[in-house]
Image (cartoon, rainbow, N blue to C red):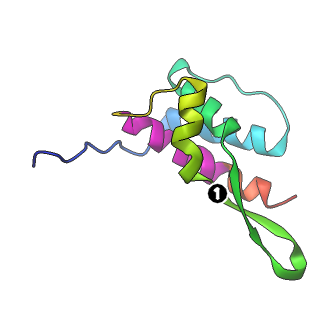
Amino acid sequence: MAGLHRLAQWPTGACHKKLTAAARAWASGEGEVELWPEHGDAFLLFCRCPWRLIGGGLGGLAYAGLDWQQLESKARLLGITVNDRPELLAQLEVLESAALPFLNER
């Protein structure tokens, strides 16, 4: 099994709730949320990473999710190490999934 990367578990419990609340507050523009120190890199990268937009025909544009192709270069510019940090990816996925419904409500 050499060469396989360890996978991070999807954040659960209080960790999941903290990340979800932070993403919803950011996406809705309402309120402030206190983050745990271990979520700082993920939240900074989440806030600075561009989003992919898809055309909605006559309905305009809709948010499709983070632009994952730009994530690593944005992390490098912010001084965030992404190698061997599967928990960072898992945290970003929670943030993205929590923010999408709020972003597309606007």
Q: Of 33 and 14, which appears nearest the observer?
A: 33
Judge from the rendering whether residue 62 lies leftward or rightward of residue 76; answer left or right. right
Residue 97 in the magenta stretch? The answer is yes
> Residue 44: x and y, percent?
64, 30
Q: Of 104 and 53, which appears nearest the observer?
A: 53
Q: Residue at x 52, y 26 (%)?
A: 80
As shown in the figure, which amino acid type bears the numbered disc 1? Gly
Residue annotated with mark 1:
65
Our reading of the magenta stretch's main secondary structure is helix
Task: Decide: is 27 above or below 101.
Answer: above
> Residue 34: x and y, percent?
68, 22
Secondary element at image label 1:
strand
Residue 82 in the magenta stretch? The answer is no
Q: Residue at x 35, y 42 (%)?
A: 8
Judge from the rendering whether residue 54 lies leftward or rightward of residue 59; answer left or right. left
Judge from the rendering whether residue 101 lies leftward or rightward of residue 17; answer left or right. right
Is residue 23 visible in the rendered image? The answer is yes
Task: Decide: is 35 above or below 93.
Answer: above
Q: Which residues are magenta?
A: 85-98
Which quarter of the rendered picture does the C terminus lie within?
A: bottom right
Judge from the rendering whether residue 90 lies leftward or rightward of residue 67; answer left or right. left
Is residue 12 visible in the rendered image? The answer is no
Q: Residue at x 72, y 27 (%)?
A: 33
> Residue 18: x and y, percent?
60, 33
Task: Decide: is 4 above or below 54.
Answer: above
Quadrant of res 6? top left
Q: Residue at x 64, y 57 (%)?
A: 65
